[in-house]
Amino acid sequence: MSDLMSLLSIGAASLAAQNSGVAVASNNVANANTVGYSRERVDLEAMIGAPNLGGVRSNDPQRYADELLGNRIRLAAGSLAMAKSSASALADLQDAVSSNGATVDEQLATLFSDLGQVSASPTDSSLRDQAVTAQRELVAGIRRRAAAIDDQRQQANERIIDNSNGASQLAKQLASFNLQIQKNGADPMLKDQRDQIATQLSQLVGGSAHTDANGQMRFILDGGAVVVDGVAASKIETATDPTTGNAIVQVVDGATRRDVTQQIAGGAIGADVSARDKSIAGAAAGLDQLAYDISTKLNAVHAGNAGLDGVNGRNMFVQPTQVAGAAASMAVDPALDADPSKLAAAAPGAGPGDNTGALALYNLASQGVAAGGKTLGNAAIDLATSVGTQASNANSDAKGDQIISDHLAGLRDSLSGVDVQEELTNLSKFQNASSAMTKLISTIDAMLGDFISKV
């Protein structure tokens, strides 16, 4: 009787174990196309055999995952997100600098060409009007670009603010998953979801995530600021820099605020900070320098010569007071704008038919009067080329990071991905074992019934 009961116990435990295998295999097949899902395996453990009891029992399902690979995937995700965001921001910046009508170097070439025509016929009012019109168009083109570049700066700030809010929410979710895992044990599904949250956070701020010996995940920014420590999460907030008006990123832990703007070296936020503070700021500074050089160099020559009325000392452009902001404030001198006859084409005292001043203005086109000893035209070309080169490099970086990310995804799939055919084989194996145990239990039950009826 006791032996039959022992066999019945073995059968019941084995049936439960095989059914666990059926459940795990079924769950794997069901999640074959679920993003971030790690396939699971049932852990069957043989019990001590005869003369004691024997049998089998199933432990908690285990996931096929590698912590080192997971960390590498998150790092790659942060790098790829930064490269893609940088490529997008720099492409927009390139449009801001190179689009918006004729390019600055083309507008400069038109102005100098028109000044050359004035030198050929200094008293022709229509040619003077044409030259001043070219001057107005050059000013309008530079100011449009200055506004477009500043718009790119503002858009970068808006993205930094939005993504910081998103990162703060993800940090809170990550800490919440740590708490759930702490309460519910090593639930494979919770760990999968936690890994996805950590990857999404990396895509915004870069950084790294590591699982401690106690199973809790910590998330740290590149500069060392701890965003998530177990069940505790710091906030990621933004504030306005009073000097620049730009958004700065802060990690807030209670009453402590830490500026981490320059420490975010990855993710979409890192890309926008870098684009805003380097590429966009560089393009703005370059355009300001160009506008300053155009205004001051042409003014110097223009003021030394005279208009049709014989008066000299007038500026061609409003004289800038400093390099910073020169592009946005650039303007044609109001007196010349109102009366093109004041265009200083003649040398002082030489009379209205003289072309000395117009020739001197025209000759500036070929002189290295811009910063760095460049011609004004070449300085304009170099500004556009520099932004274009940065955009091209960002695209190349994005392609390279995509290759790395795809390779790591392939490694993860080979380890954690679901092979449907393999799982169907496992399902059949566990079902057959379950059927055998069911038959065993039925047989033992019949034997017990027969034994009881005969007692």
Image (cartoon, rainbow, N blue to C red):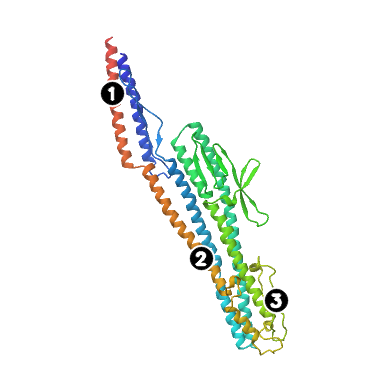
> Residue 209: image x %, image y %?
50, 43
Q: Which mark is in front, 1 or 2?
A: 2
Left or right of 301 on screen, residue 398: left
Residue 350 rendering spot, x and y as whole percentages: 69, 89
**In the drawing, does residue 21 fall left or right of residue 220?**
left
The first of marks 2 and 3 along the sequence is: 3
- Residue under label 2, please give it: 388
Label 3 crowd (10 A; few <14 / some 14-19 / many >=20): few
In the rendered structure, find residue 334 and report the number of the disc placed on it: 3
* Image quadrant containing the N terminus: top left
The answer to whether residue 101 is seen in the rendering is no
What is the number of the mark on residue 79?
none
266 up-or-down from 12: above or below: below
Type of residue at label 1?
Answer: Leu
Q: Secondary structure at mark 1?
A: helix
- Residue at x 36%, y 40% (from the top left corner): 29
Residue 418 sits in quarter: top left
Disc 2 secondary structure class: helix
Q: Nearer the viewer, residue 49 or 92?
A: 49
* SS for callout 3: helix
Q: Residue at x 59, y 85 (%)?
A: 117
Where is residue 119? Give x, y as percent.
61, 86
User: N-terminal of the two: label 3 or label 1?
Assistant: 3
Q: Is residue 349 visible?
A: yes
Q: Where 407 falls versus 15 (above or below)? A: below
